[in-house]
Amino acid sequence: MTLVRLTLQSVLARPRSWVVGLLAAGAAVLLTPGLALVESISEGTRRSLIESGTGDLQVYHSGSTGVPLMLVGPSGEAELTALEDYPAAEAALRSVEGIQEVVPLEVGMGAVFRGNYLDEKLAAVRAVLREPSSEARDARLALRVADLRRTLERVARDEGNREQAFAAEAAYKEDREALERIVSADFWERFAAEPLPALELIENRVARLAGEGESVSLDYLGTDLTRFAGAFPRFELLSGQMPPPGSRGLLLGHAAYEQFFKLPIAFRLDELHRALERGARLADDEGLRTQVERNQAELPDLLSRLDAERGAALQSALARALGHPGELEALLKEFLTLDDGNFDARYKLFYAELAPHLPLYRIQPGETLSLRNPMKLGSNVPVKVWGTFRFRGLGGDSSRVNTTSLVDLVTSRQLANRPTRAELAEARRLIDELGMGDAGAPATDEPLGTLTIVDAEPVKASGGELVVEREVLADTFTDEEMKDGSVLQAAIVLKPGAVPEEVTARIQQLAGEKKLPLATVSWQEAGGFVSGVVGMGQVLLFLLALMLGGFVLLLSTGTLLLLAKERVGEVGTLRAIGMHRRDVFFSLLLEGLLLGGVGSLLGAMAGAALLSAAVGQGISVSDESLQFFLGGPVLYPQLKAWHGGLVVVGMMWVVAWASLVPAWRGSAVEPVVAMSRRGD
């Protein structure tokens, strides 16, 4: 008790020693809210991943060379071995204590070929030609053909005015000659008699003059759509409807729908609107002005997509909006000449007056897309688009997670070119019937090697490579068909209060007892590069803490050494009246701990108050691309008791180390020497 009282008196008598406490307080003021922010970001990312399809855990085949990743990275899809008897594995997993839901998943990369505007008009004419003959059908066909003819005449004018880098090539000359024949009156007279050969000529010789189409990448999750929507609370259907149970279908991620299938001019206007809402200005931002210029440059493409009826309605709407008549192209160019003064008004007019007359989206719910997986050797798979969805609160059209689409398991297996067990059994039967089997060959998981699966009408085998012919997929499937195929991975959603580590141990115990090839990863591992970004934030905070700690250590050591040198005479007196060297050492060390503890405690309290005052009701996150990492549009930093405790203990530890050398050197002075120095 005497030692503590002596320490307190010494600290109070020397204000210069308070510098050590101020240093500790300054570091604590920075580290306390910093630790709370990083912890809140980590928790936000955890919630975002778990509630948007990852689940608390991921289960996959233990023989896989990779681990499940929910977002496809630069290296492509993870290398996973399929769980062949997935229904048995799921039933076993549902018996594990703490598991609430098991959702089958497959992460894949899809591709959709998007033709140019002439391809779309040709497809529209073909669709009408396939309808049964009637007066109404003939009237629609006449309108479509007239629109196609006007479009081809516009292509001819553009080609005549455009300087072509490859004008000397023979293929280009042939295409130009074909275009000249096609815009003649004789061609359209023959078109009425034989439309299909005429369409083929246009498609083969002229369509490419309107520009090449493009392939759009489409990341998808294959899953049981109904169970997925029920298991993950952030799922939100925005348009269309959920596919009925047993129906094949695609739900497009809303961000993908906006970015890849929306009219480019409209999408750029949306981007400009978001940028201006964040405080940007067209006058100051060259990138935004470039977007405006691109919209004007793409007017010919937009005009080519309009039929006569839409063009006339759009021209009238523009005349009303601008207050004067004019040609359609000139009116559009004037309307899209934007600046900071007129943007808001024209953005509202665009959606209120112009959008109803524009082909705003290239595909609508209820229509069919042809998907293929560019990483697999499979064929195109037609699938109906039932609607669009997003993960609520995780960013809008700029969020990566909202570009992911959902597709049913049957379609995702077809995209992966992975045969079902029934198809494999049929292939084995054919091999046996043809005498192609090798009775002496060892049994393997893939006894047939790589199968080539094609969509075709049944044909007789004529020797050569084995072809397993698959009929074109029906629009519906039975429960047995869905369960017949394999699954690559599954998301595990835990019950409230369940501990992931304990559930993981139970799953491993179950796998060992029932000889199931199951392995698990946490949400951090399944999050891939997203979890890595959060980890980088934690590393940066740790580095900041090291730098602040080193700064406090050096300055505190220097300060305490100077104070110890000034107190040599005092130490000699204490030693002369009987205080042991050990007591002197602990007294000086206790001074440092007291200064560091009080200073860091006050600093932690000040940091907590600063954080509370600064964030108030939360930190609004206007950047949609950051909302996924922060758990939603508002970040709520939660300061916990252990945050302040960790900072206080850490600073006390740093100051304790800083006090060791001064305390040792101060207590090592002999009483005679100390008294003589005091006398001097």
Image (cartoon, grey):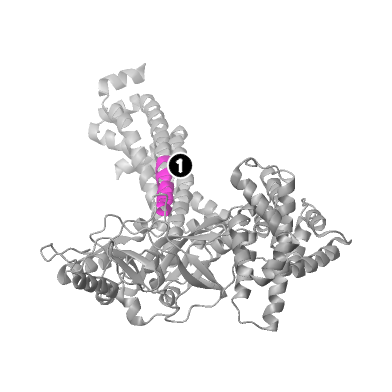
| Residue 111 percent across, percent down from the top left | 48, 59
Towards the viewer: 172 or 23? 172
Residue at the far top: name it: 680
Q: Is residue 420 left or right of residue 311?
A: left
Residue 144 or residue 665, whichever sits in front: 144
Kind of residue sitting beneath label 1: Ala
Residue that label 1 marks? 27
Instruction: Name the spot of residue 299 as percent of width and height, x first.
Output: 73, 55
Residue 628: image location, x then y, percent: 50, 59
Relative to 460, is 236 on the left or the right? Answer: right
Up the image or down, 17 lies above or below 112; here it is above
Who's the residue at 78% across and 60% down the image?
Answer: 345
Residue 107 placement (x, y as % from top left)? 39, 62
| Residue found at x 38% / y 43% | 651
Quadrant where the C terminus sits is top left
Determine the image quadrant of residue 376.
bottom left
The magenta-colored residue range is 529-544
- Identify whether 493 is placed above or below 657: below
Image quadrant in which the N terminus is located: top left
Q: Residue furthest right?
A: 324
Label 1: few (<14), some (14–19) or many (≥20) C-alpha neighbours in 10 Å: many
Q: Quadrant of residue 313?
A: bottom right
Residue 637 seen in the figure: no
- Is residue 530 within the magenta segment? yes
